[in-house]
Amino acid sequence: MSSIGTGYDLSVTTFSPDGRVFQIEYAAKAVDNSGTVIGVKCKDGIVMGVEKLIASKMMLPGSNRRIHSVHRHSGMAVAGLAADGRQIVARAKSEATNYESVYGEPIPVKELAGRVASYVHLCTLYWWLRPFGCGVILGGYDRDGPQLYVVEPSGISYRYFAAAIGKGKQAAKTEIEKLKLSEMTCREGVIEVAKIIYKVHDEAKDKAFELEMSWVCDESKQQHQKVPDDLLEEAKVAARAALEEMDAD
């Protein structure tokens, strides 16, 4: 009975007899149904890429962005429900601003990840709230260098060398593990992330997608910025070429 959630999934404050909270598992499922989001830590910074599925051909390119700047030196990529993601981004911006006004320096990435995770976790503690139906990858640059964190709907955060969440996370992780990230620059990382996103996108099942990418690295003066258009276009061309080459084999 408890394995399918019957009676135990009506509230986020109810544990099943085997110690599971089904509402949180359902929220994680919302993330798994979303477009793939990838973050990698290269030797000189962080690169984040998003497979943003396009709901309608009438939608203007660049709308409903899934990568957001949280602070000058950090950014966030969202998988799952975009509206829930905006709430987390707004909270992260608020935390970053408050920290700087109190301490007079930019918020460390570890501290920001901890505060965001605490906020997400808060929504799993009260029956009148529901968990956030999104996961976020947080990348930033501080005095300890580039750092990458993932915050899950349960409110837990992990630090990674590279991470993938969303629909194609397993295939993406397999591809990421083949890369030598410690020897790779962010310029090379942008092309590799684009290749992986194009590879894990399922043409048969999914709608068309828009590739969103950002970085925070030495080349961007340790500021979180969109990847320059010329490099993004170069990455798309390389990704399509790699895909065609794979199909030809």
Image (cartoon, rainbow, N blue to C red):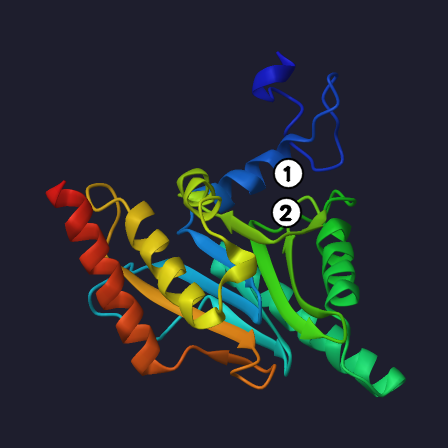
| Residue 61, above or below 138 | below
Which element type, helix, strand or loop, lies under badge 1? Answer: helix
Residue at left offset 49%, top offset 44%: 177
Label placed on residue 178: none
Q: Is residue 60 visible?
A: no
Q: Quadrant of the N terminus?
A: top right
Q: Position of residue 62 (x, y in %)?
A: 34, 75
State which tag comes first along the sequence, 1 or 2: 1
Q: Is residue 98 visible?
A: yes
Judged from this view, the residue extending furthest toward the left is 248
Contact? badges 1 and 2 (CB < 8 Å): yes
Label placed on residue 24: 1
- Residue carrying label 2: 153
Q: Position of residue 189 (x, y in %)?
A: 44, 64
Which element type, helix, strand or loop, lies under badge 2? Answer: loop
Q: Quadrant of the C terminus?
A: top left
Q: Position of residue 182 (x, y in %)?
A: 57, 58
The amino acid type, in three-letter code, at marker 1 is: Ile
